[in-house]
Image (cartoon, grey):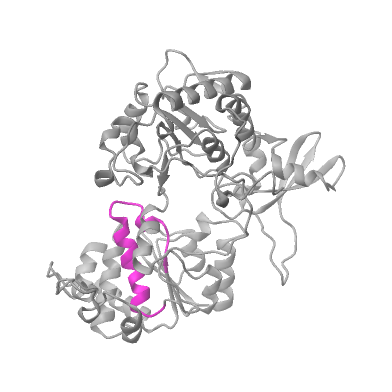
Amino acid sequence: MKELYPDPRQGGLDCPDLQRRDFVKWGLALGGGCLLSAGGLPLGLRALAADAPLAYGTGERMFFSGCTVNCGTQCALRVFVKDGRISRVESDDAEDGPGGRAMRACSRGRSMRQLTYSPDRIKTPMRRVPGSKRGEGRFEAISWEEAIQTIAKEWVRVLDKYGPEAVYRKYGSGTTSSAMCRRDEWVRLANLMGGSLNEYGTYSTAQIRNSMPYMYGAQEGNTVNDMVNSKLIVMFGCNILETRQGGGGLSYELLEAWREGKARVIMVDPRYSDSMAKLGDEWVPIRPGSDAALAAGIAYVLIAEKLADQAFLDKYCVGFDEEHMPEGVPPGNSYKSYILGQGPDGLPKTPEWAAAVTGYPADKIVRLAREIGQAKPACIFQGWGPQRHFNGETSTLAISALAALTGNVGVAGGGPGGSESMSAIPFNYLPTGTNPVKTTISFFTWVNAVQDYTQVTARKLGLRGKDKLDCGIKFMWNSSGNSLINQHSDINATKKILQDESACEFIVVVETRLTSSAMFA
């Protein structure tokens, strides 16, 4: 296998005798093959399972497969097949043991049979009816051969006319949990074709992933199962029991830590969630988007009542007070000065101030702060919700600062105050090679790169790798995701931009349903 699949970290995949036009004819089929299924099972898993099928019942055979939805848990599934069709899907029935646990799938994973045989599933390639507008949803079935030839022709045309910077893959997370191919099949093919425009960030975690390294140098944290050592758990905008339901990951680890450790759990969330209903001892309902204000109000009490861990701050933290500021920073710019109102804004972040912003009573903020300051160790962490809005990085840093203030960073039962972490099973993925294109846009600026690429510069819109784009996005590939339309900030404006066929000239959507994004293929 080493000769066939070289380590991608060692450089590109060299195919000197392979012509680009020849490769695209079978390369698209090979790349797309990773997304197809036979009998409802991922091809790779089906092939592995077929080596040793397990007999079960009359005329049934059982194969192990896995849930590939984007929660990241990767729970095991037992798929029963009769007469070439899935008869039922069940969860792993293994016993929990000292060396591991059964990865019991949630209802979403166990409904894969309904998903596979759903009447609205697209079974053939579809082409937009000539003369219809993108977004109208008027399509006609075509053969796989015609689809592959059309895509290959347009891809090569765009590469020849504009160059690889005009080719772009709009990310999607629908196959995040697929251990066999994930999203790498297109990246591999694009790299072999000469490259494509890169992107950084995601709709899910852009602010928290980019801001946490400014606080700690990296985005790392204690795993959820370490909460068994906590005396107090404070969760900001985090609802693991709904978003990570599967028995192979965070929900299981959180429940086990809660059962064994019996820590008091406080949940800060505008919504009374399933996690609060099951785990919570106290619900802190604040106005949406006011997490940073609540954190500042808590910090005020911690500092004013000397509940902050001053020894930890003095030894490990730069920027907390005026005595520990980097050289050359003007007075009044420390975190402590900001919280106490001794900074440029002159506004003390008192519990009363925080109450007016959050809608949560000042006396309860004081009590909450005292409990956080006195519990050792305390685990403070946040979900992705607080950072998924304008200035979301402010919420991320404000919440994580509480972990540092209380000296709970780097200890069992504590954590840095960022998003939850989990233990993971390592997988080998399809090697992708190296993209010769170094130009990288922010994920959120792809509409700018389609509409007016001259506005996408390093100074204005965070372009990386060069000062400005040389051309706009002309060929777009949207695979296993619906973010082409349904997650962007101004859907109506995005719709108009995509309908202009003189801008982005060709759009491919790889999907199993006619989603809102697929309507623009």
Tell me where residue 499 appears, x and y as whole percent: 36, 24
Which residue is depicted at the point 38% across and 27% down? 504
Task: Tell me which segment is drawn in magenta.
Answer: 381-408
Q: Nearer the viewer, residue 57 or 508?
A: 508
Tell me if residue 345 is in the magenta stretch.
no
Q: Nearer the viewer, residue 97 or 367?
A: 97
261 vs 377, left or right, is right
115 vs 165, left or right, is right
Residue 121, by quadrant, is top right
Residue 181, by quadrant, is top right
Which residue is depicted at the point 82% across and 46% down? 51
Which residue is depicted at the point 60% across and 25% down? 22
Tell me where residue 165 appears, x and y as whole percent: 40, 34
Tell me where residue 403 appears, x and y as whole percent: 38, 74
User: Looking at the picture, does residue 247 appear above or below residue 326?
Assistant: above
User: Looking at the picture, does residue 427 appear above or below residue 150?
Assistant: below
Q: Nearer the viewer, residue 333 or 257?
A: 333
Most distant residue in the top direction: 131
Q: Does residue 285 show up?
A: no
